[in-house]
DNA sequence: AAATGATCCAACCGCATTGGA
DNA sequence: TTCCAATGCGGTTGGATCATT
């Protein structure tokens, strides 16, 4: 936390009264913050802010550091593995974002929260069910999570180059060799979802998914019942 | 090409908790 | 024990960007 060489106490009264800056951070501000944290470490954010000459609240500095400037912060798309972990952990911890973030190195609570709100809640909305409902929890458990597992499996095979079959074949065989259910679902969804790419692979990306199940004549119960039946047999 | 709507995400806000004086 | 500043956390907002019409 605080280093031996502490910055001087907060600025004089005149300066304290100065209006604090808000909104997006500039490159210059980022550099100042990085520099002051490198010199004095994290914590005591109000002192750090004034020491660096930043017209920002300590709170704002802390948030900027933790969510953006920290060297170990991981940026870019949430991977299938991470998605799966988030779904699992959310089952266990609920909206305890910081708790969930502890299990995803480099990901911030803010990022996970945003992921949940934008992607997961969107699906609940599309399915016209409450995100906290048993129905949606079942969909997550029995449909979404198996599909993520499947995707991880496919990606893994593709990466190590041992799979000679196409992802589309894999897609229908993985969860249950006797099952065609997942494949049927995939085929029935929007073109954007499981579009076959030029190399014959399936783009099963979550980002492209669009669960217009009811639009395709499938109700939530149809989906759950059939999928439950399928995994039980 | 312009207008409009949808989506994403950085940043803010308010409340709760912690820890030191 | 009480007070208060710092910190942590979850919810919310607003602007930028992308997609669609």
Image (cartoon, coloured by chain):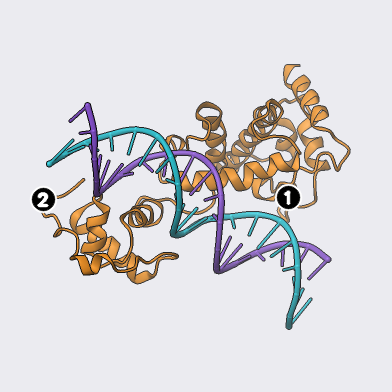
Chain colours: A orange, B cyan, C purple
Residue sitting at x 65%, y 45%? A206
Q: Are marks 1 and 2 in contact (CB under 8 Å)?
A: no
Q: Position of residue A34 (x, y in %)?
A: 28, 61
Q: Position of residue A205 (x, y in %)?
A: 66, 47
Quarter of the rendering occupied by the N terminus of chain A: top left
On what subunit does the disc labeled 1 rest? Answer: A
Mark 1, secondary structure of its residue: loop
Q: Position of residue A16 (x, y in %)?
A: 25, 64
Dots 1 and 2 on the same chain? yes
If you read the primary sequence from the N terminus, does the residue marked by circle 1 or circle 2 appear first? 2
Q: Residue A107: in sight, yes or no?
A: no
Q: Quadrant of residue B18?
A: top left
Name the residue tied to disc 1: A200
On what subunit does the disc labeled 2 rest? Answer: A
Name the residue tied to disc 2: A4
Residue sitting at x 24%, y 58%? A48
Per the model, the C-alpha gap separating discs 1 and 2 is 60 Å
Q: Quadrant of residue A214?
A: top right
Identify whether A150 is placed above or below A50: above
Mark 2, secondary structure of its residue: loop
Q: Residues within 10 Å of mark 2 (few under 14, many from 20)?
A: few
């Amino acid at each position: 936390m605080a280093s031996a060489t502490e910055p001087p106490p907060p600025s004089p009264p005149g300066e304290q009264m100065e209006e604090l800056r808000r909104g997006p951070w500039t490159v210059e501000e980022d550099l100042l913050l990085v520099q002051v944290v490198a010199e004095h470490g994290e914590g005591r954010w109000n002192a750090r802010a004034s020491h660096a000459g930043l017209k920002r609240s300590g709170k704002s500095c802390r948030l900027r550091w933790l969510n953006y400037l920290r060297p170990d912060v991981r940026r870019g798309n949430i991977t299938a593995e991470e998605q799966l972990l988030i779904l699992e952990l959310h089952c266990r911890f609920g909206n305890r974002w910081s708790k969930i973030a502890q299990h995803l190195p480099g990901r911030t609570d803010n990022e996970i929260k945003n992921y949940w709100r934008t992607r997961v809640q969107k699906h609940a909305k599309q399915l016209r069910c409450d995100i906290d409902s048993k129905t949606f929890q079942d969909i997550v458990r029995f449909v979404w999570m198996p599909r993520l597992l499947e995707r991880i499996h496919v990606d893994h095979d593709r990466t190590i180059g041992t799979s000679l079959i196409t992802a589309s074949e894999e897609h229908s065989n993985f969860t249950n060799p006797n099952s065609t259910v997942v494949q049927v679902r995939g085929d029935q969804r929007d073109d954007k979802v499981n579009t076959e790419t030029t190399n014959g692979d399936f783009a099963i990306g979550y980002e492209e998914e669009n669960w217009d199940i009811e639009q395709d004549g499938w109700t939530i119960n149809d989906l759950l019942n059939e999928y439950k039946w399928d995994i039980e047999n």
